[in-house]
Image (tube, helix red, strand yellow):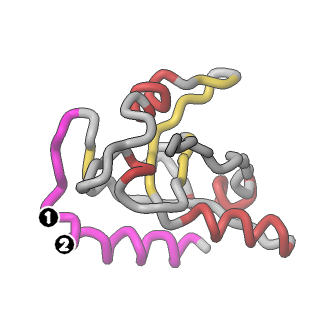
Amino acid sequence: MVRQYVAPAPYVIDASEELIERIAKDDMVRGVTIAAGGFFGPQGRELRIPLADPKQNDKIEAFEYKGFKITNFEMESSALAGLSRLMGHKAMTVCMVIANRLIKEANTGYKNTIDILVRTVLDRI
């Protein structure tokens, strides 16, 4: 039996410029968020099943388009971005770094500061 790897078709959705200007002040890093509609494998983490593309994270890190580089990789906002676009809503992603897989470090104290980020975003909306 020959197994064939079939990757889902990627899609790109611009964040709302209005929300970016309102929420992302000088205290936030602006960049491109890539979201994977899955958990371990799509983020390059192997858990009992071999990765379909072990070089995927290297490709993501090297990717650049019109001067934009990927600065954030997460898994929750892809569906929200797609739905907001389809329904005509404004959306953007605001994330806190919890794990930096590139340098293999984790922010174990993130729970102490996530409330501050949530309040900041809500105040700026």
The residue positioned 50% from the left and 45% from the top of the image is 1
Between residues 119 and 74, which one lies in front from this camera angle? 74
Proximity of marks 1 and 2: CB atoms separated by less than 8 Å: yes
Judged left or right of residue 87, residue 60 is left
The residue positioned 54% from the left and 29% from the top of the image is 69
The residue positioned 64% from the left and 70% from the top of the image is 80
User: Residue 63 location, x and y as percent?
Assistant: 55, 25
Residue 60 shows which numbered tag? none
Q: CA distance from mark 1 to mark 2?
A: 6 Å
The residue positioned 75% from the left and 70% from the top of the image is 84
Kind of residue at badge 1: Gly
Magenta span has 120?
A: yes
Quarter holding the C terminus is: bottom right
* Element type at mark 1: loop
Kind of residue at badge 2: Asn
Q: Which residue is mark 1?
A: 109
Region in magenta:
103-124
Q: Which residue is mark 2?
A: 112
User: Residue 99 location, x and y as percent?
Assistant: 25, 51
Residue 10 to residue 109: above or below: above
Magenta span has 48?
A: no
Residue 95 to residue 68: above or below: below
Judged left or right of residue 14, residue 40 is left
